[in-house]
Structure formats: C-alpha cells, structure tokens
Amino acid sequence: MTHDFLESLKNELGPDVFFGDDIPARYHNDWSGMTPVRPLALVRARTTEHVSKTLRLCHQHKVPVTPQGGLTGLAGGARPIEGGVALSLDRMNAIEEIDTVMATMTVQAGVPLGVAQRTAEDAGLFLGLDLGARDSCLIGGNLSTNAGGNRVIRFGMAREHVLGMEVVLPDGTIITSLNKMLKNNAGYDLKQLFIGSEGTLGVITRAVLRLQAKPADLATAFCGCPDFPSMLELLKSARQHLGAALTSFEVMWPSFYDFMTGRLPSLRRAFSEQHGIYVLIENGGRNAEDNRMLLETVLGEALEKGWVSDAILPASNREARDLWAVRESVSEYGKLMGPTTAFDVGVPTSAAGRLVEAVEAAVSERWPDAIGLSYGHIGDSNLHFVCNIPSAGTNQPYKAITELVFDLVAKEGGTISAEHGIGLVKKPYLKLSRTPEELALMGKIKHALDPHNVLNTGKVLPGSEY
Amino acid sequence: MTHDFLESLKNELGPDVFFGDDIPARYHNDWSGMTPVRPLALVRARTTEHVSKTLRLCHQHKVPVTPQGGLTGLAGGARPIEGGVALSLDRMNAIEEIDTVMATMTVQAGVPLGVAQRTAEDAGLFLGLDLGARDSCLIGGNLSTNAGGNRVIRFGMAREHVLGMEVVLPDGTIITSLNKMLKNNAGYDLKQLFIGSEGTLGVITRAVLRLQAKPADLATAFCGCPDFPSMLELLKSARQHLGAALTSFEVMWPSFYDFMTGRLPSLRRAFSEQHGIYVLIENGGRNAEDNRMLLETVLGEALEKGWVSDAILPASNREARDLWAVRESVSEYGKLMGPTTAFDVGVPTSAAGRLVEAVEAAVSERWPDAIGLSYGHIGDSNLHFVCNIPSAGTNQPYKAITELVFDLVAKEGGTISAEHGIGLVKKPYLKLSRTPEELALMGKIKHALDPHNVLNTGKVLPGSEY
C-alpha cells in the first residue's frame, strides 16, 4: 500500500514531491528544539489543488500528513512524522490583491508576515499583526496557530485580522470563503474553526486579512511602581484615559529587569533606585502630540496617587528605543543563561502578581541556584517565565519545572499557553487548562472532519496518538 | 412516548415548565412577523442545570427544542415548533461579576443588553455592543446570532465582545469555558462554534464579555457628496486620519434621505441643495476637542478635493442629534410606508453604489409605483434596502422582491445577511451566499453535535427540515 501511495503521489504531484535525502533538513523540525524527524515524503505545494490532491491521497491511504509553514513554532506543531508526509505551503507566496477601499489584503498561506506588513505599508495601510519571527513565519502558520505577539492589546490576536479564508479539509475538499466584508451572518462562520486549531482540522491555503490605518508616532513612558497592586491601578487608569490607543503595557519584574541590566553592558538602568515592578506604556492615538499629552496626564495622576514612584517620558525616539531595549533583550537570554525552560502562560491579570511570587518561590525552593526571570504582556494577561538551573548544566529538569509551573497556573484558573499553542510539547498538560467535556468536544469535531485522523496526527488533542 | 416525555419534563423541571394555554402568547413568535406557533411545552430555565435537563430529555426522546432569548430576531430563528419545546433563557438574568482589572463582565444569557450596558457604565467601563432593541434583546440571543448594530465599525460584531462562554450541547453536556483572558491558545477556541450559529449547535447559558474604556464626547459631521466614488474617497481619508476612532460612517442615498425629510415634519434638511449621496461621520477618540479638530482636517481636505460638496460640523449636541434624527428615522418607515420587504445585505464596499443603482432600477422597472429606500453602515459594507409597492396594498410580493434583490447581491459576491441572520426566513436563499462545500461542512458539524437534529430544528441549514 505504501508503494501504491508513493506512486500516486509522484503521479499527481510530479516535481513538487521529494523523498528521502532529497528532503532538505529544514523540513525535519520546527523551532521547538525537539529531535528532528525525516518524513517519508515532502510536498511543496504550488497551488490549492496540490494541497487538495495531497490530502485526498493521504486520506484514502490513511497516511498522516503534517502541514508546515515557516517552521518557527515553539510547540512542535509542524514537526513531521516518520512514515508520513510533510506538506509545506512555502511556495504559495503570492499576494493576490490589496483593496484600499475595503482595507483588505488577499494572500496565499506561504507569504511571510514581514512581506505582508511591508506590502500593506506601501499601499498606505497597516497590518496590525506583528511578532519577532516576522521575516521567517508565514501567514498560514500565523492563522492556524492564532499567533499573538506585540500588538495584541491594541489589534487583537491573529483571529481578529482575518475576514475570509480558503481551507482544504482532510479529505481534500476545498472550502473557499474569501469574504472581505466586516459583517457577514449568512450561516456558520466556518473560518473560526480552523484559526487556532494548529492544522489539525484543515490546511489554510489563502486568506483575506483586515488592514488598519497607519498609526501615528507612538508616545512611550517607563515607570517604576512600588508593587503589583499599584501597577494594576496604573493599568486601569491607562485603559480609562487612553482607550483603544493603549498600544503596549509591558511589565518586568525585578527578577528580569535586574538580571538583564546587570548582565548586558549595552543596557542601562533607567532609574538609580530599585522599584517593586517596572512598566513600559505606549500610547498610539491618531495625533503624536496628543499621544504624549495624554500619557503625561496619566503619569501625573499616577505619581500623585502613589501608583508610580518614578517615571520617564523620553524626549527622543532614541531615548524611547533605549527603554524598549531592556524589554527586547529577551532574545538574548539564551546566550546569557544557557539552556532554559520557557513559559507563555496566562492568568487573570489580578492573579498575575500572586502567580509570579509563587512560581519564583517554588522554583528557588526546589533548585536553590535557579535563575528565573518574569515579565509579560500584562495588559493581555500573558506572562512569560524563563528558568535555568546552573547546577544542572545541559541536563535541565524540563519536565519537573514544567509540572511545577503548570500546576500553579492551573490553581489560578490560568492557561498553559496564551500564545504559542499546544502542538506536541504541551499536549500532555492540556487537561490542566481544559475540562474533560471541552476535550471530548474537541475530539468530536476532529473526528467529524478527519475520521481517519490523518491531518497533523498526534498534535494538540490528547488520545490522538499515532 | 410523548406522554413519557411530558411526564419526565414535569418531574425534572417542576414549576418551570408550562403547557397549552399556560404558555403566554409572547413565546409563540419572534419579531419576524411569521405566523405564531404554540409549542407543546415552554421551559423557562432558572439555571444551567435546567437547560441541561431539558436538552437531555429532548435528545433522548427526539423532541425538537427551540432556544429563545428576547425574541427580537427578525429572521424567525426563535419561532417555536408545534409539538416541540420552547426553551426560554429569560429568567437567567443575573450579572454574576464585573472585574474592573480585567475589564470583563460575567453575565447569564437572559440579561437584557441595555442592563448590561448600564451596569458596565456604573462601574466606569463601557460595553461596545449596541443595537436598537437593546432593552428587549438578551445577551444570549445577541451572541448566538452574532448581533451587529450601531458600533461595528469601531468595536466589531458581538463575537469580538466575548472572551468566555458556557454552552449546553444538544445532548445536555455542559461546556463551561468562562475564560477572562485576552490571549488563550490552549486547544480549539470552542466558543467560536456557537457564536453566530443561531442556537443550532448549543444553548449559550453564560458569557464573559469584554468591556472597553468609556468613550469621550463624539464629534459628528454631516456631508453631501457629489456621487458614490467621491464618498469612497472620503471614507478612505476618514479611515486614514481617524483610525480606530472612526465610530460611524453612515450613508444615505437620496431615495432614503429625500423620502424621510419630505414625509416626516419633525425632520429638516441639512442643506438647501440636493446632493448625490449623504454621509454621517462620527469621530470618537479619547479627547473631545481633538475629535472635532481631526474631523475638521478631514472635511477641509475633502472639500478642497471635491469629495464633499457641502458639510456641517454641528456646534452643539442638540444640532448633532438633529442630524442623526434623519438616520434614526428608520424606526418610522413602517408607519409611513405600510408593509415593507426589508434587507440587511452586504457587499464589498466598492460594489455598493452599483448594487443600489441596480436594485432601485430593477424594482422600479418591475413595479413602477415602488417606493424603495437605500441606506447603510457603509463602513461595515452593510446595506439596508426597504421597499413597498403601494398598488399591492396588504398583499406585497415579498418573495418576488426578495429573489430579485438577492440575485443582484449574489452577482456582486455579497451576503444575503450581514447582521440579522438566516433563521427560517432566509434559509431558502442561503445557497446564494455559500457554496455547496460550505453548506456540506456546516451540515457535518451540525450532525456531529446534534445527531438527532433536535436543537433549533429546521433553522439556518437547508435540508434540516422537520
């Protein structure tokens, strides 16, 4: 049967299918750091019909197929299966249309996010989705994982940037719903099913993205707050005064701020004194002058009320970049810390202070030499924690740290993944964030669409092992 | 079997189930104007467990059950079935929590929208969802129909106001996902399946709503534009300059504007001259003074470029209300026109001018005495058209008008329902807006969740007759 299958694949996909050593190593894994796997075959689709043919054959022959985008995922969702097919969308990279009246952009799944961003800006518009991997990740992967990133508080997750989609179902059926309208209540909104399901229900081939007006110059402020509750008052006040213009509200605990400014010579501390917690605020309304003025009002009140102990409103873009440099130094922690266990958990914002205290204390108690750094997109209730145990060297206790942190997150009613997704890496822990009834419903939907369990087999859903 | 079923219902629901003449007439229909139907029984649930018991019994006995909210729907989605059960959520009307740190509100499905709005405002926050029926419609109905309304261009449809939900599946299983976090990528986002599926997949019992900062005073402008293309240039410019602060962009064609100002003595024309098309713009940024200034900038440029022929920036709130009064006179057209056929279609914005011309011409050609009024939330690509044929008296050719309009909408790639939904009224035409593959996928999902087809039987999906 495998022989029949491979022959059919060759016949139908011709020069777009690769086998064995002809499969470049980059398709053996994503950025999860798991062990690479060489699949049976790699299809690099050029058209939606190629995707449909591949899925139809895999469905008929019950061969697992792993969709792949830019392979920048951190959860192993695009890691292929030995004996299965990897289906890459990276050649479907055309921008098909920009509609400046509707403020939409129609793209194929293989367009890199950065290319889509620049094309929108060239047309006088703006794509609100942004993340660090912008020049490597592809739109199809962003949508199938419901990517988050840097501008969620202002523009929302990937889901909120999609108006229409084309998807290929596990049996090869092509569902074309390239809607461009903001309002459309004619039947079920099918695209919602595929966004964020990490390629387990269908393969996204094209999308209509919603574009925004280009933002004006942002105003930035950096604050030291006495403690977590006073920072929450600042958050409420910023939300009240700045409304939708609040573009960032990034929080750094001393564990993160002191470590980074102490270890990286390029960074300088903004204040001579120590503070309980540090906040970067960005205001992105339609008028640059007004952005700064409103931020001054917020900070004035906060200083008076004691929610903020000290604050800086940078006088130049350069000074603003210096303040952001500390927050953006996260890309350096691997170099400074060695191997880490990293988290992208979420908890209701009011519980975030308690959670960080509990996590830092529990990790230190169990591994006294632990280095743990806490920071987060607190406005989105998303916390990051990265941890290295120096005495463990290259043999970090990943599993023990993960279980310790996830248990504390579950106790606060939080989510084990706010943005990176479940993939393979977090699958064993999904039950900590979702009830048995929710998991059963996910399984029911998966079975209805993919009865042979061939599409991204083994990912996300417990019990979908291969 | 019916006897057994009724006995079980009585035993399990006790005083919360009503039969025959004890069922008040208001539960026999919604606002669709269809013929009322008295169901076999009415359950007025007080708890999620009541909903679960009702659905479990209906599922076991294969008795159709129609969920009901405020019964303000225009598409017949909540009209009960003879021999079936009507399940009203109107007694589940508690506001369970307001979280001012997360800016969320947890409500039961039977809370009237207006009550939720006022409660949010009392807490210093703001619920972005608003529609004319605010004091009659219930949150559960708003979410299950993905309601649109007056603020979509700024805050989005109902879907975008939901962070978490509790839903009862057709077999009685309770799915509690009362997430409060903006970011949560732990598995499928199940709530998306139930929002906008008009009660055919599950019954929404509770929801976590996302609240906003209270908006500042709005600035309003009223413009006369020479024609549709120049109005589109004004739209692009307003979007560019006002960004997310653009709160309304409402368009009235002369057919609507001249009819209303000519027939209603309380309304006065804003301009002495006639214009090709009329636009109301609202700017709702964080600063009242700035709102007006930015709007002046947009209008100044538009007058110079000839996109706008004449414009008014009202000097007082009272003057602004007078300008809005014409747009809001839609609630009066029934009195002025008699029986009408009304549409809430959507088309890509650039095709809207062509569609209105084609619809008005085709209707006039077929019924020379027709009165047809065109207006719309053009910023959301949503058009309304209402039509009366005076010579037809009480015997309006609803079906012929509907088919004529929907055919023209389908030719432009539009949607037969931008906001009101499909229900029973538009079910025969759903195939004009959705492909056979899309309809088959909707059917597959329906069958997976509701194999006996008992939940809101006969609604939305073609072929789901009872």
Image (spheres, coloured by chain):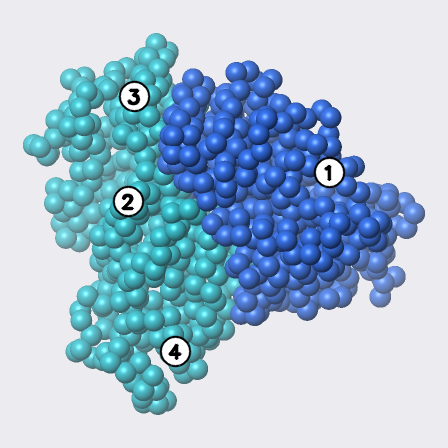
Chain colours: A cyan, B blue
The residue to which callout 4 is attached is A53
In the displayed structure, B2 sits above or below A307; it is: below
As rendered, which of A96 and A305 lies closer to the eye?
Answer: A96
In the displayed structure, A466 sits above or below B63; it is: below
Q: Position of residue A429 (x, y in %)?
A: 39, 53
The residue to which callout 2 is attached is A121
> Which callout, 4 or 3, points at the residue further toward the start of the chain?
4
Q: Amino acid at mark 2?
A: Glu
Between the residue at mark 4 and the residue at mark 1, the CA separation in whole angstroms equals 53 Å
Establish whether labels 4 and 1 are both on one chain: no
Q: Which mark is residue B95?
A: none
Between the residue at mark 4 and the residue at mark 3, the CA separation in whole angstroms equals 55 Å
Proximity of marks 3 and 2: CB atoms separated by less than 8 Å: no
Instruction: Read off the chain for label 1.
Output: B
Between the residue at mark 1 and the residue at mark 2, the CA separation in whole angstroms equals 44 Å
Identify the element where label 3 is drawn: helix
